[in-house]
Amino acid sequence: MTSNSRTITFHSSFMLPGMLEPHPPGTFEVLVDEEQLDVMWDARRSSTRIMFVYPGRVEAFPVSAMDLEQAISQDQQSQDNNAD
């Protein structure tokens, strides 16, 4: 299994599937684990989590890579529109 991490920043409140309410903006760590599947062809399974740090605890919130990229894109568009 391989693991990668990156840091992302949301400039506006954002929602991801499964959230009950918008999350405040901020900078977050995203962890992606990729595992080679034991099949005859090259196949991998990946899982993506965004880490939310709260006083006294850290929550790993699962999210699909596509949903995360869509939320990042919407945040960027919001920033671009506010810059005009």
Image: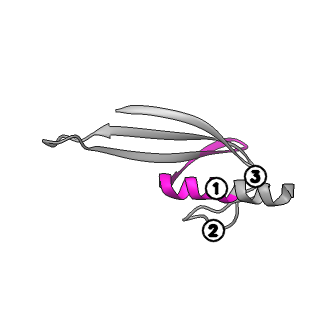
* Magenta part of the chain: 51-74
Residue 30: name its quadrant. top right
- The answer to whether one can see residue 12 in this image is no
- For the residue carrying disc 1, how many other residues have a C-alpha within 10 Å: few (<14), some (14-19), or many (20+)? few
Furthest residue in direction left, as rendered:
40
Q: Is residue 24 above or below residue 26?
A: below
- Secondary structure beneath disc 2? loop
Q: Which mark is residue 73?
A: 1
| Residue reaching furthest to the front | 84
- 8 and 50: which one is in front? 8
- Can I make out residue 18 in this image? yes
Indicate how the structure is coloured in the image: one colour
Q: Out of 54 and 15, give the one closest to the viewer.
A: 15
The kind of secondary structure element at disc 3 is loop
Per the rendering, the mark at residue 25 is 3
Identify the residue at horizontal 58%, vertical 35% (top origin): 6
Q: Nearer the viewer, mark 3 or mark 2?
A: 3
Return the residue at label 2.
Answer: 20
Judge from the rendering whether residue 33 lies leftward or rightward of residue 40; answer left or right.
right
| Circle 1 or circle 2, nearest the eye | 1
Which amino acid lies under the numbered mark 1 shown in the image of this protein?
Ser
x%, y% of residue 2? 38, 31
Query: Could you tell me the amino acid type at mark 2?
Result: Leu
Q: Residue at x 49, y 56 (%)?
A: 66
Q: Quadrant of the C terminus?
A: bottom right
**Measuring 52% from the left and 47% from the top, which residue is drawn there?**
49
Task: Mark 1 or mark 2: name the one nearer the start of the chain.
Answer: 2
Q: Bin the neighbour count of mark 3 within 10 Å (Cα to Cα): few under 14, some 14-19, many 20 and up.
A: few
Give the distance between the C-alpha atoms of the residues marked 3 and 2, in whole angstroms.
16 Å
